[in-house]
Amino acid sequence: MAFGTAGNPARFGTDTASTSDRELFLKMFGGEVLNAYQEKVLMKDKHKVVTIQSGKSFQFPKTWKATSEYLTAGQEMLGNDIDTTEVNITVDALNVAHVDIYDFDQKMAHFEVRSEFAQELGRACARTYDLNVMRSIILASRSAADGVFPGGLTAEEDVLLVAAPTTDAQKLAWFNAILSANEKMFAADVPEDVERYMLVPKPVFNGLRYAVDSNGNYLVANREFNAAAHGVNRALQVLEIDGVKVMPQRTIPSTDERADTSVYSKYRAAYDTTTGIMWTPDAVGTVELVGLNMEEERDTRRQSNFMVAKQGVGHGTLRGECAIEFRTGAPTTA
């Protein structure tokens, strides 16, 4: 077979430092995964995160309060002790999201497969990250005291802290529970000048928006009413109640996961009575060994592209007193 003179097409997939004509296509996909991940991760900027270059764990220093005293003239100060300890958080196994795209199916698809699948890989990694941080907050709230360091905190009411409040009494109970949780943190010497976050199911969030006092006055929703638009700001996704930023979340752990092998072993516990969580950034820590990145391999024999998004991180308790679990009762133990 004869060919004409070779042309000089612009190989726009080739990086300047590479001989591969697919180099930029690969990086585009990686960027799509990273963007989807960053858009969906909720918890990453709301707790302590440390990145390590090698190793299997990281030791977070933990200090208690200093004391002050009055000095008598002529006394020599020798220095008082400050209680210190450390918390070791290990990296979990590699977490991966992967897909194999068959060329012929991609050719027939009526939508752009690559970007859609990239977003789903990113969302899958983000979902696992967020869930494990949430589980760690709950486990921190259940942690026992360690010497002078206080244990975790719990807000527990069998009847009123339901996950879908419908009556004014139930809505008000949630509102009051947040005030009570703040008082518990205050009693545990949790600093009041740090951010406080709370995640609740959407029905609870809506209930808090329209909770009313005994006089029929809205406790937090008044500012949402817009007379000009004759309606309510339904787009509001953060309520601030007593200094706590309350947000709706659909994926709060709420089942018994003790035997769930899809959950990494150190996070398996019974969350079947959990209805919400509240914390400060000091409650839990994350060690990041492998940040989110991707790999792509062309399989000519199968006429497909195999794509993997992966991350290697681990989470754990730092300060139990900075975490509060809201629940309807004690979790299942049988």
Image: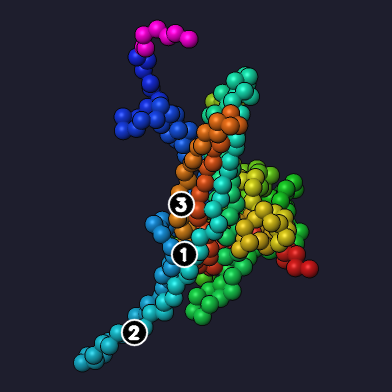
Query: Which of 40/109 is in front?
Result: 109
Residue 249 in magenta? no
Please report the bounds of the magenta region as a residue range.
1-7
Measured in 3D between alpha carbons, the distance from the residue under mark 2 to the one under mark 3, in whole angstroms, is 41 Å
Q: How crowded is the residue under tag 1: few (<14 C-alpha within 10 Å), some, or many (20+)? A: some
The tag on residue 212 is: none
- Look at the picture and state if 85 lies above or below 178: below
Left-right relation of 306 to 48: right
- Is 73 on the left-hand or right-hand side of 169? left
* Residues marked 2 and 3 touching at CB (< 8 Å): no
Badge 3 amino acid: Val
Q: Which mark is residue 57?
A: 1
Question: What separation in Å lies between label 1 and label 2 (alpha carbons)?
Answer: 31 Å
**Callout 1 touching callout 2 (CB < 8 Å):** no
Give the mark nearest the N terminus, 2 or 3.
Answer: 2
Protein image colouring: rainbow
User: Which residue is labeled 2 in the image?
Assistant: 80
Q: Residue at x 34, y 14 (%)?
A: 8
Q: Which mark is residue 290?
A: 3
